[in-house]
Amino acid sequence: MTLNLTAAEMEVLEALAQRKDLSKTAVIRQALRLLQLVDTRVAQGEKLFFEDEVQKKKAELMVL
């Protein structure tokens, strides 16, 4: 399989792989599993939030 990424996307992939000590393939697989989970839960009517407990802020992530 061939995956065409922009230079910026490849830089992000490489940085994540290095930071997480994973292969680029493992990062892509993990991203796919996460997207599948989020997509399933959003389809069931659930929402995804990021919360900063220190600053008492909450933001909803809008998923298309």
Image (cartoon, rainbow, N blue to C red):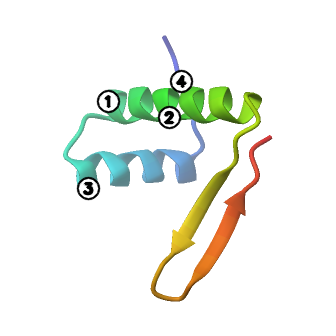
Q: At 45% from the left edge and 86% from the top edge, which residue is drawn?
A: 54
The percent position of residue 36, horizontal first and vertical second, equals: 57, 26
Which kind of residue does numbered mark 4 sit on?
Leu
Crowd around label 4: few <14 · some 14–19 · many ≥20 (10 Å): few
Q: Return the residue at label 3.
A: 19
Mark 1 falls on what kind of element? helix
Q: Return the residue at label 2.
A: 34
Q: Earlier in the sequence, mark 1 or mark 2?
A: 1
The percent position of residue 39, horizontal first and vertical second, equals: 66, 31
Q: Which mark is residue 3?
A: 4
How far apart, in angstroms, are the residues tagged by discs 4 and 3? 21 Å
Looking at the image, residue 52 lies above or below residue 47: below
Mark 2 falls on what kind of element? helix
How far apart, in angstroms, are the residues tagged by discs 3 and 2? 18 Å
Crowd around label 2: few <14 · some 14–19 · many ≥20 (10 Å): few
Mark 4 falls on what kind of element? loop
Q: Earlier in the sequence, mark 4 or mark 3?
A: 4
Answer with left or right where residue 6 lies relative to residue 46: left
The percent position of residue 1, horizontal first and vertical second, equals: 48, 10
How far apart, in angstroms, are the residues tagged by discs 1 and 2? 12 Å
Q: Return the residue at label 1.
A: 26
Say which of marks 3 and 2 sits in front: 2
How far apart, in angstroms, are the residues tagged by discs 2 and 4? 18 Å
Q: Earlier in the sequence, mark 2 or mark 4?
A: 4
